Amino acid sequence: MNQLDALKQTTTVVADTGDFKQLGTFRPQDATTNPSLILKAVQKPDYAPLLVETVTRFRGRPQDEVIDRLLVRFGCEILSIVPGRVSTEVDARLSFDTEATYTRAERIVDLYQAEGVPVERVLIKVAATWEGIQAAARLERRGIHTNLTLLFSFCQAVACGQARVQLISPFVGRIYDWYKKTAGAAWVEADNAGASDPGVRSVRRIFDYYKHFGIATEVMGASFRNTGQILALAGCDLLTIAPELLAQLAESAAPAPRALDAQAARGLALEPVQYDEPAFRFALNEDAMATEKLAEGIRAFAADAVQLEGLMRAA
């Protein structure tokens, strides 16, 4: 048994890619996409025709609609390969607009359903801003399940749990990046690896809190820089992993023992936390790393959406 198969014994493995032709190799349960991954995919010869076909078919429609149709086209291709769910992201430029996020998510689900995809096979990805979380709460009440992304802080996770969202994607690698950059020459890699990695510690805290208090929201670790971060979270509900790291796990014969334990979390001495909007905003503001990485992530996804629009106009 290779390390990837061993990991699948304790964790649902998800592929983090728009490159759906790679999926069959690793047999993930689910797959996640985002504007950056789709942008990367459509610039490859294998996928450029999907962009051209979509633009040609829906030429004259509003740009935002054509982009959603392209995202759904990729999602449908992915769902023909994976047995579970695909995550499709709402435009990051709507991250601070609850109503617009909600409306855009409804349209994406409608487009999937028009292609014969049942709603339970789609997760709508929304940035974990206060506005995004409120939109997700409304979507969940409507039976549309959500994946809250760009999640870097405990307060974001608690608010998502309160909103009863289906799934959260706490980022590991980007947290690691921030602490490493901030420490500069004082950073000692060995002291910040494995279970001591700041990104790993963040996800463990969220996982333990959810399991201790019986919060049903699924925890899916995301944004990995190396397999050590992945293995330190074995036992997490799900882990979404880029193809190059899936390949490294598949090539290793080393064990992948459980690192997170829901039963053990139930025995911890933890205090419940609640956030209303002012408390959430203050807690997020107090976390410099989360504030910076959330803003940076939204800007990056928005920039990639603009670049994708440019490619579509040129098609």
Image (tube, rainbow, N blue to C red):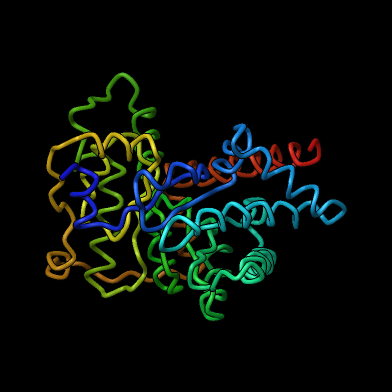
Q: Residue at x 71, y 51 (%)?
A: 67
The quadrant in which the N terminus is found is top left
Rendering quarter of residue 52: top right
Between 312 and 82, the residue placed more toward the observer is 82
Give percent across and percent down for residue 50: 67, 45
Between 235 and 72, the residue placed more toward the observer is 72
Instruction: Classify residue 17 as left or right of residue 12.
Output: right
Between 52 and 246, the residue placed more toward the observer is 52
Instruction: Classify residue 11 as left or right of residue 144.
Output: left
Q: Residue at x 32, y 57 (%)?
A: 238
The quadrant in which the C terminus is found is top right
Q: Residue at x 79, y 53 (%)?
A: 57
Instruction: Classify residue 268 as left or right of residue 285.
Output: left
Q: Is residue 115 above or below residue 305?
A: below
Q: Residue at x 52, y 45 (%)?
A: 18
Between 104 and 185, the residue placed more toward the observer is 104
Give percent across and percent down for residue 206: 30, 59
Q: Is residue 147 above or below residue 247?
A: below
Give percent across and percent down for residue 282: 47, 57
